[in-house]
Image (tube, helix red, strand yellow):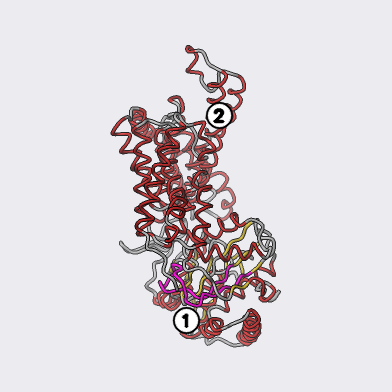
Amino acid sequence: MKINELLIKDAMIMDLAATDKAGAIDEMVQKLYDIGRITDQKVFKDGILAREAQTSTGLGDGIAMPHAKNAAVKEATVLFAKSKNGLDYQALDGQPTYLFFMIAAPEGANQTHLEALAALSRLLIDPDFVAKLKNAQTPTEVQQLFQTAEAAKEAEETAANTETTASDQPFVVAVTACPTGIAHTYMAEDALKKQAKAMGVTIKVETNGSEGIKNRLTAEDIAKASGVIVAADKKVEMNRFDGKPLVNRPVSDGIRKPEELINEAVSGKAPIFHGDGSSATTAGEESAEGTIGQRIYKDLMNGVSHMLPFVVAGGIMIAISFMIDNFMGVPQDQLSNLGSFNEPAAWFNQIGSAAFGFMLPVLAGFIASSIADRPGLVVGFAAGALASSGGAGFLGALIGGFLAGYVIIFLKKLFSNLPKSLEGIKAILFYPFFGLLITGFLMLLINIPMSAINSALNDFLNSLGGANAAVLGALLAAMMAADLGGPINKAAYVFGTATLATTVAEGGSIVMAAVMAGGMVPPLAIFLATRLFKNKFDKEQQDAGLTNIIMGLSFVTEGAIPFAASDPLRAIPSFMIGSAVTGGFVGALSIRLMAPHGGIFVIPLVSNPLVYLLVIALGAVISGVIFGLLKKPLTSK
């Protein structure tokens, strides 16, 4: 398949009307929908925004490649768009963006589609080709440029395959990978190859893309390499590089800074990578797998992301059981059995409790597996179960997950010199048995102080009222608005869900109520600001504001990301003020929530639904008005 089979004329915008990132995304998504290449604008746009939230696809040098691969895409398509005056797309070099390639790939994208997309990414490394695209005036001219460039690239690669490499040239190996594996993976590959050739360095690059692993590095390649470059934003196979100098950077550095990465790899000054989770490094420097803080955050989020579905689904089922009993009636002397007194309620409670009971084992298990791969899973699950039964709660399970992971790392080192005849039973016998033995007894000891801490924390949360509850509610709600789905937001949400397990008997968690309310405010504030201050938002932003009312009411805080990304200094403080006011009122009024998610769809599970909605509306009005007043009016071209 040729590039022009994806880069069709109907999917080209030769003069974008948008003046900012949010508007450009909306305009391009609308175009794909208008020509029938996507079936659902919201689903596809959510995929685009999720990728932007990881890192901007504005690559610099005037190019952006937003991309998504999801069920809304009917047929693989590349939309080409130009902005004559350029616009702020939060590009990596901080400069305006002129050329846009919005890649839409279906979930079942076949090999030929993916290869064509990879070829497209590689062509955009050539500055001469990019300059010609900027001057193109018609869709036909754009297609002709790609046809010519693609033919030249094929000829160049054919010639390169016949060249011999000088044996005295330095040799490095590299791996490139991005979360979706469509664009950045191959642009980084091409940039590294091109720079290595200019520097007289031989390089072999393995790509971990949507089409699978290509050009896989062999043990011989790695052994003779003087250094390793990993330019990746997702997990790649690392243990094979044990003992090698390794440069670990985001995939964007592979595109933007190939010379810097190659120089560090061949200099001998890169950190030596050690497999099984450890890496030697000088204090203050990044290790070969990222800083310690980055590793801890990644491991924690692996546990949290696997835990949340159990909490959300199980928590809502338990909450429904309380609603059923409240509706059907429970005698005063049986209130301790609320949620399981009437048979229909008991059914919901039993099912919800089964799912909810996995919360702590899943959290600990997947933290451990992130640290030590599959051998850590069983030991982590056991550590979480022991934390649950021993009263150590969420904090105990969190500690147990990290403990289990590092115990397995210790065992891997301990058993590293066993005879090869015993290799096969290490993973199924030695690691689980000795890991469980060590971690289990350590957890029995850890449970003693952690149980006391957990009980004290629960007593504090249950006794919250008045000023104390208002302060805590305001703080957590403001955290929800601080980075809109980032680490601070996730920390607040995880803390809120952790309080649910011990507050069901009291009718729900004040903390969870404040967290959800705080997360609903930013998108609702966007909706209000785009309605009240129309002179400060263009047509695309106003249309996006309409979708934010749905996202806000559904507790999807991320709906505000495009507006915050385009104007963070005005948007984020505005959101935090309104969310803090809302969270403060929720705490002061002791409003409780029995579900960990759902927005207005779980309003019946709130202790005071009407007041809860009113304080959310108050926060949204405050944030929306502040944001609207701070934002500058639109300027005409």
Which range is magenta? 78-102
Q: Regarding mark 2 in the picture, which secondary structure is present there?
A: helix
Residue for point 65% across, 63% down = 34
- Can the viewer see residue 449 in this picture? no
Residue linked to disc 1: 170
* Quarter of the picture holding the C terminus: bottom left
Q: Where does the image place residue 463, in percent across and percent down from the top left?
A: 33, 27
Amino acid at dot 1: Pro
Indicate the quadrant where residue 39 lies.
Answer: bottom right
Residue 82 in the magenta stretch? The answer is yes
Label 1 sits on a secondary structure element that is: loop
- Where residue 252 is drawn, which disc sits there? none
Residue assigned mark 2: 320
Front residue of 579 and 153: 579
- At x 69%, y 76%, the residue is 2
Q: Nearer the viewer, residue 241 or 318?
A: 318
Q: Relative to 560, does residue 493 appear above or below in the rendering?
A: above
Compared to residue 554, the image places residue 181 above or below, namely: below
Residue 403 visible in the picture: yes
Q: Dots 1 and 2: beta carbons under 8 Å?
A: no
Structural distance between the alpha carbons of marks 1 and 2: 65 Å
- Relative vertical location of residue 483 with respect to residue 353 in this rendering, above or below: below
Image vertical order of residue 169 relative to residue 70, above or below = below
* x and y, in percent, of residue 65 in the image: 54, 69
Q: Quadrant of residue 253?
A: bottom left
Q: Amino acid at mark 2?
A: Ile
Badge 1 or badge 2: first in the primary sequence: 1
Instruction: Give neighbour class at mark 2: few <14, some 14-19, many 20+ (Cα, 10 Å).
Output: many
Residue 443 lies in the magenta-colored region? no
Which quarter of the figure is the N terminus placed in? bottom right
Q: Position of residue 496 (x, y in %)?
A: 42, 39
